[in-house]
Amino acid sequence: MSAVRGGFSSRLGFILAAAGSAVGLGNIWGFPTQTASNGGAAFVLVYLVLAFCLAYPAFMAELLIGRYGQANAVTSMEKMSRNLWQKRFAFIVGFGGIICAALILSFYGILAGWMMSYAIEPVTSLLGYSEASSWLTSQSITRNLIFTALFMMLTISIIRRGVEDGIEKWSKRLMPMLIGLLILLIIYVFTLEGSREGFVAYLNPDISRIFEPDLLISALGQAFFSLSLGTSVMVIYGSYISKKENLVTLGAQVTLIDVSIAFLAGLLIIPSMYVAQSQGVAIFSDEGALISGPNLVFDVLPSLFDGMGAIGLFVGFGFFVLMSIAALTSSISMLEGPVSFVVERHNIERKRATTFIGFGIFVTSALIVLNFDALFGLVISISTVYGQPLIAMLCCVFVGWIWQRSGILAEIKLGNDTVEHSLFWKIWPWYTKFICPSAIAIVFYHSL
Ligand code: TRP
């Protein structure tokens, strides 16, 4: 039997857990590199607008579904459905999100494993184990399998403990560490030669690019990925929030933290690249664009750390620990989506369900590692390019077209009795019904 449902014990607990899910490799790696390849501050500006105008309303829809349903994504949406067709639709959307979360975790675990192995490398270097160091930083099937397994074990061990003791407690420990490390690294990089140039490149907008379709599409995709939308995760986190809380402000706070950390990460990565350049590292590709993707994190930045001498070991260690923490607070939320579904729908005990599903996802990761060229990019596109936007759009359709307006108002009023007269309530229902689904559909269409 499933025990009494867990929940967040405090407002701060929810904020840090949801921000933990949102802030991940997408913020610290994806956002800065997208910024670099899309006209610097022009991208930042568009991203800010889209995050608040499109991603935040969709995020609110997911949180509300969960808090209303007080259950996993499928059950919550089924509770709103009034006939068999709607129930089927609810199942498809909810279950689709759960599968999407599991798929994302299967590739995210591999990336996170790389971050962990790069975090250990400075330690082996310091101890003089040069063979171990080169093993840790070169691609191999064994290394990838071992570190993905280690990372999955960490994720499983947190989720086995449940919401309050696992997710909430660890988010409260890890998120402040992440923010502290990020700020320390930024301050340090700013003392180095070349960082000013990077700062200017980051913050100087090329306004002419603001309306470029590619830039808009990348910015919206990034905003959806970053808020973990369309993966059932925010629905389940919403279901753990007390009915006394004001969801409108909680959602806005989480969005603000997510966006701010992405912005701060840009302040770290772009100036670091220019520091690397002043040390002779190539930071532009042959086509003249700033290097992004894996080369940035695993070549450019490590060459920068190497060039710093002994202190570079500590900076490199700090940087990859930061990446690993960001990945961990996101991966626990990805695992919670499928686990909550199995626990609640099939009455399986949480610890068993977690181990079982976590292992299943690890097997998927192992298949990806063994067929890397064929599967890695494919799983990423299925889950993030197609799955996430499509399911996020369907969640908006669900709230906008299937859930009755009076029902939405009743739910949103809990913890926020004056909401009926607020600007939010004047705009948001209409927005979720028409604007969000159409905007997502347009972006989706363009990305095909
Ligand atoms: N938001 C995470 C990041 O920025 C990644 C992510 C995408 C995610 N989808 C998710 C996290 C689903 C948890 C659940 O890196």
Image (spheres, helix red, strand yellow):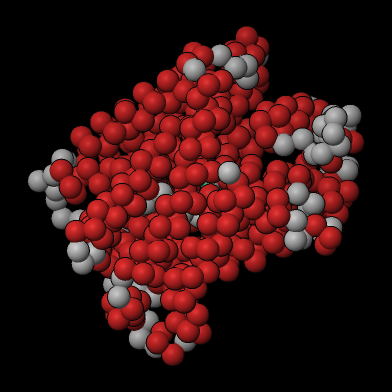
192 left or right of 178 in image: right
Query: Which of these two is toward me, 190 or 380?
Result: 380
Q: Is residue 11 above or below residue 27?
A: below
Query: Which of these two is toward me, 180 or 289?
Result: 289
Q: How many marks?
A: 0
385 left or right of 126 in image: left
In the image, residue 145 lies at what x, y percent? 46, 19
Image quarter where the C terminus lies is top right
313 left or right of 180 in image: right
Q: Quadrant of residue 67?
A: bottom left
Residue 183 visible, this orientation: no
In the image, residue 291 lies at what x, y percent? 77, 35
329 left or right of 190 in image: left
Residue at x 33%, y 36% (from the top left corner): 157
Q: Quadrant of residue 256?
A: bottom right
Query: Which of these two is toward me, 425 or 172?
Result: 425
Residue at x 25%, y 47% (from the top left corner): 341
Residue at x 58%, y 57% (from the top left corner): 442
In the image, residue 272 lies at what x, y percent? 78, 41
Residue 295 visible, this orientation: yes
Residue at x 60%, y 46% (from the top left corner): 447
